[in-house]
Image: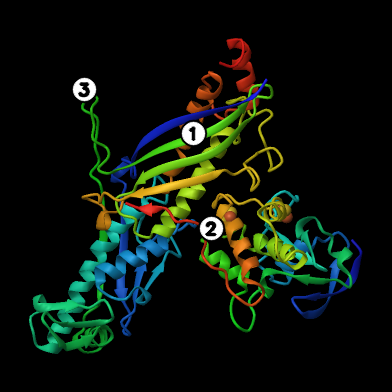
Amino acid sequence: MARRRGRGIASVNYPIGMNLGGDPSQALVHSNPGGKFTVALSSIDLGQGMKSVVRQICAEALGVPVEDVFVDTADSDTGPHCMGSFASRGTHRVGNAVIAAAEEARGVLLEAAAEKLEVDAADLVTDGRGNIHVRGAPSRLITVADASAAAQFEQGRTVSGRGIFLVPMSTPDPETGAMDPVTCYAHACTVAEVEVDDETGEVEVISIEAAYEVGRAMNPRLVEQQLVGGGWMGMSHALWETTEPYYPDRSHGPTDFNQYLMPGPGDICEQRFTILERPAPDGPYGGKGVGEMCSTPPIPAIANAIFDAVGVRIDEMPFTPEKILRALKEQGGAR
Amino acid sequence: MSHVTLDFRLNGTGRTELIAGGETLLSLLRHRLDTTSIKQGCRQGTCGSCTVIVDGEPRLACITLAATCDGCTIETAESLPGPGGLHPLQQAFMDHFAAQCGFCTTGMLMAAKALLAANPSPTREDVVDAISGNICRCTGYQPIIEAVLAAAGAGPSGAGQPGGSRPGVV
Ligand code: FES
Ligand code: FES
């Protein structure tokens, strides 16, 4: 009877988004007369940081300070359509839609500025600090605020843009079944270290170490926040959470937090991450997505670590002491 | 149901309210007095999102009868920001990215505030213990523990420093 240590590895190729109906997202961007921009979305920030990332992306595409961009996700009735916040799709799908909308709005802004400066719009650049000037002649400038006001009070233009991003629907080839549903994959490799008590069947996760390839880490602290929280979720799926122990029979299913268990602050393990950046050709500034994928690889990594520790393969989540003890009994003990 | 009057201090202001005998502190504060920092998660004492401080002790408002708080001093997260801005715990939560959806955050802040009032230099174990009745679905707890430790290190007037080693971007 002993606590036995094991180490397991799992890798994931994570498809960003999904293939239903093209998986589109839309964005609308407009400037108020003071030169501040609003991005209207139906996409929801659940706490994963989408609003921050969209704000960064929009500011970059417009060429204005990030402080001058506001993201309005208030209402899916009045905002432009979005499929939703899931499948790690927000940064990729919404980000691309926002770039398209921001580029259109930027085009109008530069036209308005060009008219005021009496130059060709193609010769104008933004400095990212709220000014538009002639390329190579920084003193021939107009502020974004003045250009926006001129558009809206003198020239009769709306400084606005529309954007949509859509991955064309892929249907299976009737002969071979082959299809191409995904344009963008993120990748990860996770190593989990566990201790299994071969007397009680209890598993303690000692550490999770992982490398995540996320395209471009738009906001490294938000990526890290997702990875830490997602690692915990993966560990929770692996060892704790279950809705219906006798699925599809609902009996004995948990009905509250006394029965639906998750690891608490005393059950967490050390987590270490490395973020790899390999920009995606069709990602917004190379960005992929990390929200959901990071909760997946800890699960097989922990299953493999349990096998390494005591020699039993548990292939049904969660890996409860009961399942481990039954498997150990069948095997005739740990090995 | 019979009604009684309740005298208490809420976030520094004296109040008198007429309450039903069976009314919970959660119902009184959140639903009637608009103290909406208090979140109603489970309403049965298992999630901690309704944590408030009553006479210095963390309490679950959903299973506290308001009638038991006569003469008490009650603090909610609304009381955290001072004249100089955010409370050090709030600043540390921001610096450490310790909130995602935010549903648990106010309860966590109040549990942490009660801890630091009783124990200004907690160990990691003390912090884990203090927030062990508060469920967070998003953060994995690590950033919250780091934030509370940083706020403790910063003392009552300073702000927490972002700590821990950041992952390398390669
Ligand atoms: S609402 Fe009070 S503990 Fe959950
Ligand atoms: S931040 Fe979402 S529950 Fe804690």
Task: Give residue A60's position: percent from left, percent from top.
Answer: 27, 68
Chain of the residue where label 3 is placed in the rendered structure:
A
As drawn, A69 above or below B112 = below
Q: Are marks 3 and 2 in contact (CB under 8 Å)?
A: no
Which of the two discs, 3 and 2, sits closer to the camera? 2
* Quadrant in the rendering for residue B18: bottom right
- Mark 2 CB near ligand 2 (8 Å cut): yes
Q: Is residue A295 left or right of residue A138?
A: right
Residue topped by disc 2: B101
Residue topped by disc 3: A176
Give the structural element (helix, strand or loop) at label 1.
helix
Task: Give residue A30's position: percent from left, percent from top.
Answer: 30, 73
Give the structural element (helix, strand or loop) at label 2.
loop
Q: Residue at x 13, y 86 (%)?
A: A115
Task: Give residue B40's position: percent from left, percent from top.
Answer: 68, 57
Q: Residue at x 61, y 22 (%)?
A: A323
As drawn, A334 above or below A53 = above
